[in-house]
Image (spheres, helix red, strand yellow):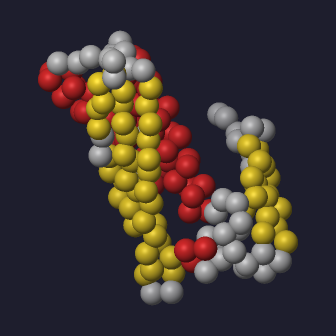
Amino acid sequence: MSTFTVKGTWTGNRNGEGTITTDGFHTAVSAPKQLDGPGIGANPEELLIAAATNCYMLTLSAILSNRDIEYTHLEVETEGTVGKEGKRLIFEKIVHKPVIFIKEADDELQDKILKLAHRAETACFISQTLKGNVEVTVEPVIKIVG
């Protein structure tokens, strides 16, 4: 079993501000501007999306490496959609948009990489944790560099 600890501080009411600290991360936090907050530092919505993105990148890199698929790097842009259910906010959807940069690949290898990009989402433990509550999808792109 592994334990992960995050420490938080908060000053003020809903529109106050705080900090979140881990062993390798420290950031200011507040309610987001999109939800009528002050927009100071990160917000809970971005932090949840960041966790999903980090897990997806790690999982995709592991899957590609385990299959000896060479790539120069990955870039992922992730969008999260928050809606309202009555007065309650709900996370509706998270969409990962990975770009996998490779030096060369025929159509067969590109198809394989696209399938693995989708597989990474189902293998990511953060995505598994959110399943049933939030729709998580992948829209991969392959770029040949060289």
Camera-nearest residue between 5 and 79: 79
Q: Which image quadrant for residue 83?
A: bottom left
Residue at (29% x, 25% y) in the render = 144
Q: Position of residue 16 (x, y in %)?
A: 78, 75
Residue at (43% x, 56% y) in the render = 79
Single out the residue that lies furthest toward the bottom: 86
Residue at (43% x, 81% y) in the render = 85
Single out the residue that lies furthest toward the front: 146
Residue 127 visible in the shown view: no
Residue 2 visible in the shown view: yes
Q: Image quadrant for the N terminus?
A: top right
Q: Image quadrant for the C terminus?
A: top left
How many numbered markers are drawn?
Answer: 0
Q: Could you tell whether 108 is left or right of 2 in the image?
A: left
Camera-nearest residue between 105 and 29: 105
The image shows residue 70, relative to residue 58, as above or below, that is above
The image shows residue 114, relative to residue 35, as above or below, that is above
Q: Position of residue 141 (x, y in %)?
A: 29, 38
Single out the residue that lies furthest toward the left: 107
Residue at (44% x, 41% y) in the render = 76
